[in-house]
Structure formats: structure tokens, C-alpha cells
Image: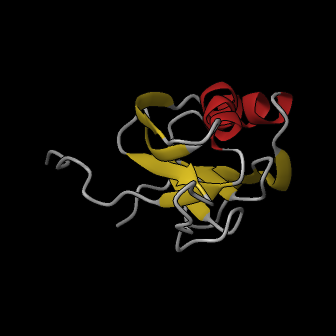
Amino acid sequence: MSTPAPTCWPCLSYRDAPAAIRFLVEAFGFSEHLVVPGEADGEVVHCEMVWPEGGGVMLGSAVRSVGEVEATKAGGGSVYVVTDRPDELHAQALARGATEIRGLCDEDYGSRGFTVADPEGNRWSFGTYRGA
């Protein structure tokens, strides 16, 4: 059975969206697909980050120059990402400054994974569990 193209994209808000983009690339291995800058210096209206194993996340600046405020609070997100390489990503994330929340472990249901926080507090769980 083939997996359809992703149709569910978590969206996060950051106080410093450009720094968040760099962190997601360096610590986790996401790649920038689309970045739409805003009018203010350092403002990101919309960014699409692609996960190399499928899917991705979208993000933007928490406060926009036109006074619009995102629906989600900066640092208030939580994302689960499927990966076949949790050990490698765990080491990479910690080396790039992620804060460990739950260390690398094997779960009763067969997954191997961990949870870290990015510099603004969003929680990122990575594991081998692909869902039912």
C-alpha cells in the first residue's frame, strides 16, 4: 500500500522565525521549501519546511507587522515526526542545542524515539511509530 501525499501540516508560531528555520534545518534535518518574508525585518509571514522522510511543518512569526497575531502562542506547539533514524537524530538535536524532555527509549508498543524542545519551547517528538 502506498502512502498518499501529506494533507495534514502542523503550524507553529515563533518570536524569531528566521532563527527557528535555521534550527529546524541544522538540528533536525528539515529543508526550507518556501519562505515568504513580511514587511518588517526578520518577519516571516509563511514558511513551509519539508521533512525528508515525508510531510513537513509550516511556521511563521508570532506577531506580524500589520498587527495580526497568530492563533497559536509562540512555543506552545507539539509535533510528532516519524523517522527511521531516531538515534542519529537524537544525537544531532542535542548537539545543536535542543533541550531533552524525554530521552531516547524503546516503547512497549514497538517504537523507539525521544522528545526535545526547540529554543522557543515547542516540543518535538521523533520516533519509529508510524501509526495504525
The image position of residue 57, as x and y in percent, is: 45, 49
10, 83: nearer the viewer: 10
**Is residue 98 left or right of 112 when viewed as pictured?**
right
* Colour mapping used in the image: secondary structure
**Is residue 123 left or right of 110 when viewed as pictured?**
right
- Snapshot quadrant of residue 125: bottom right
**Is residue 70 left or right of 55 when viewed as pictured?**
right
Residue depicted at 60% across the width and 49% down the height: 126
Residue depicted at 25% across the width and 57% down the height: 7
Residue 50 in view (yes/no)? no
Residue 54, relative to residue 76: is it above or below? above
The image position of residue 99, as x and y in percent, is: 86, 48
Q: Name, please, the residue furthest toward the left.
A: 1
92, 48: nearer the viewer: 48
Tally the marks.
0
Residue 28 in view (yes/no)? yes
Q: Name, please, the residue furthest toward the bottom.
A: 71
Residue depicted at 78% across the width and 53% down the height: 120
The image position of residue 94, as x and y in percent, is: 83, 35
Residue depicted at 70% across the width and 31% down the height: 27
The image position of residue 93, as x and y in percent, is: 75, 35
- Snapshot quadrant of residue 108: bottom right
Which quadrant of the figure contains the C terminus?
bottom left
